[in-house]
Amino acid sequence: MFTAFRSYTVISMRTSWLIAALLALPTSMEAADLRATVRDEQGRPVADAVVVAIPEGALRRGARSRVDQVEQVDLEFVPHVKAIHAGSSVSFPNRDRVRHHVYSFSPAKRFELPLYVGTPAEPVVFDQPGVVTIGCNIHDWMVGYIYVSPSPHFGTTGAEGAALVAGMPAGRYTVRVWHPRLAAAEETTRRQAELGATGSVALEWVVALKPEARVRRAPASGRSGRY
């Protein structure tokens, strides 16, 4: 009987210690959300805008084990804008029936994937923050963008011009917006945000966009031909 009581007492004490330890965890383990809205000067929602939040203090590098994708579908890059954390890798699977030759001359990452179908054997590592413009050496109208973020906290707006950056630790952040057609420098979009341990903060931007200038696509009848 005494042995059973002693065992119950030990278990109760361990449970109490566990509860106390959980209650003593720092509130920084809790997370808040940033809800961003981006519109143009006519009030229309802006899709494919990258919203990046940079925390005060040292930045954490991205894990190289993560592999994102930019697909080639119907002779276009999908998605048109891809945001990743510096240190991440990107694979470029070709879903078309024709070959593509993917390349970039951008200072943040220069690379070339010669004519291929299917998925290249090795993904491309993007280890420097910046904007990487990608193209196809065969199809001039194919243009896409990879935004390599210095911060792990970022999101991309959808058709409604809204982006959610979830799971952010409490603290002060500098928040910026980038878009391929942004008329001004990205630095001009800087905002300061203070996030608590829980809840969400909403920010809105109205940005000026440059006119879209894209190379005209080849006729649809030629999409299934050999290149």
Image: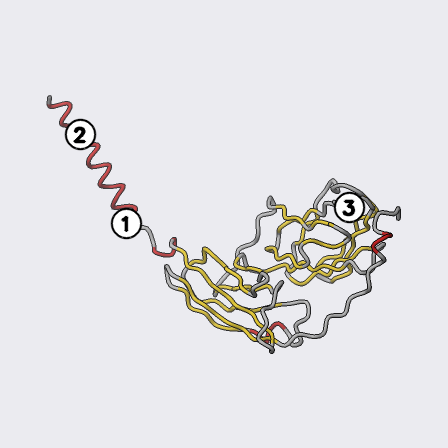
Q: Amino acid at mark 1?
A: Leu
**Mark 2 surroundings within 10 Å by alpha-carbon count, few (fewer than 14), some (14 through 19), many (20 or more):** few
Distance between mark 1 and mark 3 Cα atoms? 54 Å
SS type, badge 1: helix
Q: Is residue 193 left or right of residue 3?
A: right
Q: Position of residue 217 (x, y in %)?
A: 82, 60
Q: Is residue 225 left or right of residue 173?
A: right
The residue under the point 37% across, 59% down is 198
Q: Amino acid at mark 3?
A: Asp
SS type, badge 2: helix
Number of the front mark, 1 or 3: 3
The residue under the point 70% across, 75% down is 210
**Would you identify the image quadrant in which residue 147 lies?**
bottom right
Q: Toward the viewer: 165 or 215?
A: 215
Name which of mark 3 and mark 2 comes first in the sequence.
2
Number of the front mark, 3 or 2: 3
In the picture of the structure, the residue carrying the numbered disc 2 is 8
In the picture of the structure, the residue carrying the numbered disc 1 is 23
Q: Is residue 116 left or right of residue 86?
A: right
Image quarter in which the N terminus is found? top left
Residue at the front extreme? 221
**Mark 1 surroundings within 10 Å by alpha-carbon count, few (fewer than 14), some (14 through 19), many (20 or more):** few
Q: Which of the numbered marks, if any, corresponds to residue 96?
A: 3
Distance between mark 1 and mark 2 Cα atoms? 23 Å
Q: Toward the viewer: 31 or 28?
A: 31
SS type, badge 3: loop
Q: Which of the numbered marks, if any, corresponds to residue 172?
A: none
Name which of mark 1 and mark 2 comes first in the sequence.
2
Q: Position of residue 162 (x, y in %)?
A: 53, 64
Distance between mark 3 and mark 2 Cα atoms? 66 Å
The residue under the point 74% across, 40% down is 121
